[in-house]
Amino acid sequence: MKKQEPRFEVRSADWLTLKQAQEVILSSAQPLLSEKLPIQACLGRSLSQDLVARATLPPWDNSAMDGYAVRGEEISHAGPSTPVVLSVTGVVHAGDLPGSSVGEGEAIRIMTGAPIPPGADSVIRVEDTDSEQTPGIVSVFKNRDERRNIRPAGQDMQLGDQVLVAGTTVTSTTVGLLAALGMENVPVVKQPSVGILPTGDELRTPERYKDVQRGEGIPESNGPMLAAAVTGASAMPLPLGIASDDPEILRERISKATDADVLITIGGASMGEADLVKEILEEFGFEQDFWRVRMRPGSPFGFGRLPRGDTYQPVFSLPGNPTSAFVTFELFVRPFLLAMGGHKRIFRRTLRCQAAEPLKGPGEFSHFLRVWLDSSTVPPKAHITGPQGSGLITTLADADGLAVVSENQTEIAEGDSVDVILLADTPGAETYTKSDFSTG
């Protein structure tokens, strides 16, 4: 019998820990340049510089509620049986000038946000008065508002105060603050562009879904999923289309990604005979930093760089199974993209929960289990979403977070504490519909 040539690639695995892999990746993350955008276009982006108050806010002492501006000492003994009767000498609305002073025995009707008239040091809420049953005369029945309900000038910010720092992610509330600063255009870090390259002869896009129904292919779900995840990380997805297991098509797709800030390849990350991705990348001068991480799912993950002119393009090699692709994106690619986009906070929030059932791990690797959270208890209880195979998509879609079973842990017992990485998206995810998710 004729001896066959080896068909499976022999590759040396680095087997980095999760922390080691993150450190290697993030050491090469440099924020992009700054640009200015209209305030409403900044959601999900990071500020590229510190911002200071351009005015004192509020600009004057103002009323915290509707009522009557008075001298506090005059109503200090007011009560239901001993009302204090004052003459109402005017009214002031939000946006008015303070107007005349409050004299002895006087009150001025005032609205929320209106400037406090000179001489007043208290605002009596309407419900503690008779609301001027006799026009021009108000009776005050309670003294609880003596020297209260006045918001001092500058309580929010003083002219020149630093109110936002570079690296702040712009949320809807940040937009409100930027508007309060009187800003029309905001300095933000540019969005990283991310080429997304699913690979494999077996992948089928929606127009070829009949192949899936006949058992002749599998749905190409990774490309759209990661395009949405990229947008959720405030970056810009650039779908490159599916590359079949053909060297020429792989070369064409990789060349197409030349202008992207980052390249993600999906599949072809293990040791199969058709896993050509690394081989073709090396034709372009690819330098691999590491391959293989001590984790489940997603251990055949790799990271390196492609020379692109006078710079390098970071390349993330993700496994092809959907959960493996998603988990490695969350733990490695997402923090890198946020750092590249200038964000201060680059990691997901972690919540200490209680295991609702035994959570098992492989022992020698860190394990990330898909869980849903029952928030009716304190702390929330973490439940497995179902079978944990890395090729499954339904149990991934049901997950509120990833329960962490650390390296060298084989099981977290029911009732014990477990850290769960929450999978809530950033504000940038709200714009995902603008991306082109075509993978054909």
Image (tube, rainbow, N blue to C red):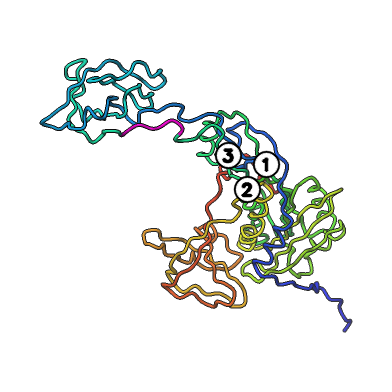
Residue at 59%, 56% in the rendered image? 347
Query: In the image, is 250 to the left or to the right of 152?
Result: right
Whichever of callouts 2 and 3 sits on the residue coming sooner in the sequence is 3
Q: Which mark is residue 343?
A: 2
Q: Which mark is residue 189?
A: 1
Whichever of callouts 1 and 3 sits on the residue coming sooner in the sequence is 3
The one nearer the camera, 305 or 90, is: 90
Neighbourhood count class around disc 3 (C-alpha, 10 Å): few under 14, some 14–19, many 20 upward: many
Mark closer to the observer (2, 3): 2
Answer whether labels 1 and 2 touch (C-beta < 8 Å): yes
Neighbourhood count class around disc 1 (C-alpha, 10 Å): few under 14, some 14–19, many 20 upward: many
Q: Is residue 269 magenta?
A: no
Looking at the rendered structure, the secondary structure element under dot 2 is loop
Q: Start and end of the magenta stretch?
A: 148-154
Picture quadrant of residue 417: bottom left
The residue at which mark 3 appears reads as: 43
The one nearer the camera, 66 or 409, is: 66
Residue at 57%, 34% in the rendered image? 160
Q: Which mark is residue 180?
A: none
